[in-house]
Image: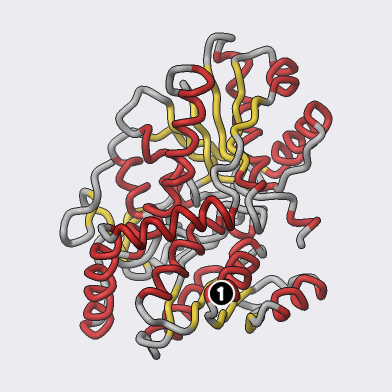
Amino acid sequence: MAGPDPSGRYGKFGGRFVSELSATFLDELKAEYDRLKKDADFSRQLNELLSDYLGQPTPLFFARRFAEYLKGGKIYLKREDLNYTGSAAALNVLGQALLAKQLGRREIIVESAGGEQAWAAASLARHFGLRARIYTSQPLPLLAQAQLRSNGAEVIIKADYQYKDLVNVCVQDWLAEPLERYYIPALPVGPHPLPEITRDLQSFIGLELARAVQRKEQRPPDILAADSALALGAFYPFIKTEAELIVVEPVETIEDLAPLADGQPAVFQGAYTRVLQYANGQAGVYASPCPELNYPAVPPELAYLHATGRLTLSKIPRQELLAAADLFRETEGLNVSLRSAAVLAELIRRAPTAGRAKILTGVLASADLELWP
């Protein structure tokens, strides 16, 4: 997949809409990131940590009984719920925490709507000897808060905040002390180069998946499904293949709006992308049953791939998520989060008509958060 042009644009999407002072810090970050990407020692450290700390690559699970029940093609699932911390968030947090350490920062800042980003940030901050400041709108279980704080994290609960508000607070904190702090977005969104950095680190998922499917089947998959937060990383090696790439957007009911399916082009939090908007132009609310996806805009590169027709979109209502999770538990004995169930629900839709010769794949983004930690 090609990167953005020098201004950080993917077609008309992306770019940077920030103050002059913020642009200076972002220019410096881009230059340092480009330097470290080419640094052999940085790459060695990152790869060692991915393997020895997180347990990557995570397995590619052949869901035989699930597929047999659906009477369709083969179904393979990338098990990101099995790495340390139990979610795909750890990949991005690990890489950016290492980047923060290399840049001499002493504190990382994250937003966390459902717990995934919080646990990854607390664990990796402790590993790198950094402080962690975690903003969340979800009152986490007391045991979870205690474990986060035992790792030295500062947990700040903003109960009346939406996801987009948490992002604003994190960015404000970061830019108040940019030489001391480092902001790690949960999604590949925001002004350039934040989406590029997050996408690059998430792309380990797609690269691992591509190698594993090739090893097992000697060819790429026919269908790949991922949620909107992970789609760029999962799709990375498949953009130029013939695989059908499906972005799933969980919603409460099928009538509810989702940012990729129903958003409009606009500038939002530093980038031009697709955004759910009210009639007055204010950002709307994405009513997802998965808190970690409740951001009203989409990654700008995903908006570009949507505009070029490369993606298939699929909204999945809560009722289907619950049914998919139940079926997967009954056939494979595995519990999944609602976020992961969205991918399973899409495969349930596709498998019966795909044909038995097809290879269907999906990314299980996280473990069942009811059991976390």
Q: Nearer the viewer, residue 313 or 54?
A: 54
Residue sitting at x 66%, y 65%: 115
Q: Residue 38: where, in percent of width, then height? A: 25, 58
Q: Which residue is mark 1?
A: 125
Q: Is residue 261 visible?
A: no
Q: Residue 121: where, in percent of width, then height? A: 58, 70
Taking 371 as reference, is 243 left or right? left
Taking 197 as reference, is 213 left or right? right
The image shows residue 306, relative to residue 66, as above or below, that is: below
The image shows residue 21, relative to residue 285, as above or below, that is: below
Q: Nearer the viewer, residue 343 or 267?
A: 343
Q: What amino acid type is highlighted by mark number 1?
A: Ala
Taking 25 as reference, is 259 left or right? right
Residue sitting at x 28%, y 41%: 1
Residue sitting at x 69%, y 47%: 338
Q: Nearer the viewer, residue 332 or 208?
A: 208
Q: Residue 359: where, in percent of width, then height? A: 53, 19
Residue sitting at x 45%, y 85%: 173
Q: Residue 217: where, in percent of width, then height? A: 51, 17
